Amino acid sequence: MTAHRIDASLDTAIDVFTAERDPVLRVAPGDTVTIRTLSAAGYTERQQHPGDHPPTLIDGRRGHCLVGPIAVEGARPGQVLAVRFDDLVPDDWGYTGSGGVDTPVNRALGLTQERGPLLWDIDAGTGVARNQLGLGVRTAPFLGVVGVPPEPTGEHSTIPPRPLGGGNIDCRELVAGSTLFLPVTVPDALLFVGDGHAAQGDGEVSGTAIECGMTTTVTLSLLDEAPVDGIHADTPAGRITFGFDADLNAATTTALDSMVDWIAGLHAITRSEALAMASVAVSMRVTQVANQTWGVHALLPHDAITA
């Protein structure tokens, strides 16, 4: 196993998913990578006041400021890339935007014209972030975007999460100690990461979390088989399956379908029995509402079902 380090720069940062860019780093399965990413906007300087727009690393940014692709040698479609989050350390400042944009949520709340940006001081040591209003929250750092290209050709937006490739999953449970399982879509997997969040609620209802730079250490492994198809995770909170769709009902059904399969396999029971167990042990959560596509995840706590 080899340890690598890579930082956001003009040579390593990008704002789309693509398999047609040369890898910024090549690693072997089992290697560990420490990745320094900027905030989703790619700000290179701290914001000085609400509404401030410091310089960004990428001019004319089309999506999230990510680092990648990272090639995992030998990865091939049909395998699963296991991304274990060993450590996530946020920068000491961040921001949260709200309102002022014509989205379905803002329209419903009457906030298309009113903005309410927050600037945060983040103390990674104490695990607390505090904003200019004097209000604080506990931090639980994770990366909003972790994904691989959805197909071998073209450039693909980083904004919507996808059943193929993942990407802008925005799942607050993907903290240190979690492993995210991504089906490999292209040779060498080609992983992109970024969009650090110091804290976020389920839903990411304003469209942003506490957006911040992040120093993330991951271990990358390859699996020939996984307990369920599709994107899923094993986290400190429990096992998680995901659904992504413009239709909330479809996203919910996809996440639940995979969780039913997982429970049935874990306990050697039928799918109908597993659905009954899910009804008493699984929580269905709206992952995010902000990115053109609904995200839903099913959460099965590790101790929810006893044998």
Image (tube, rainbow, N blue to C red):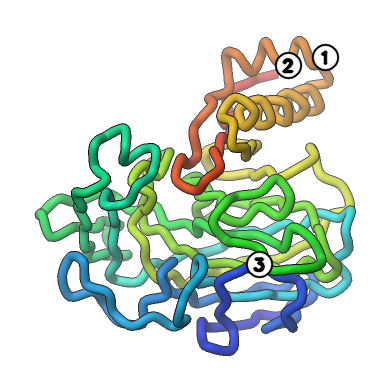
SS class, disc 2: helix
Marks 1,2: beta carbons within 8 A: yes
Query: Which residue is more in the foreground, 28 or 193?
Result: 193
Q: Which residue is mark 2?
A: 274
Q: Which residue is mark 1?
A: 270
Q: Residue at x 70, y 82 (%)?
A: 25
| Image-based side of 102 in relation to 6, left or right | left
* Residue under the point 29% across and 50% down: 138
Q: Please, is residue 104 above or below residue 60 in the view?
A: above
The residue shown at (63%, 75%) is: 68
Distance, label 1 to label 2, CA atoms, is 6 Å
Q: Is residue 10 left or right of residue 184?
A: left
The three-letter code of the residue at mark 1 reads Thr
Label 2 neighbour load within 10 Å: few <14, some 14-19, many 20+? many
113, 227: nearer the viewer:
113
Q: Report if the CB atoms under discs 3 and 1 are less than 8 Å apart.
A: no
Asked where in the image residue 168 lies, by quadrant, the reply is: bottom right
Task: From the top left corner, tell me how far across and down residue 62 is, in percent.
Answer: 51, 69
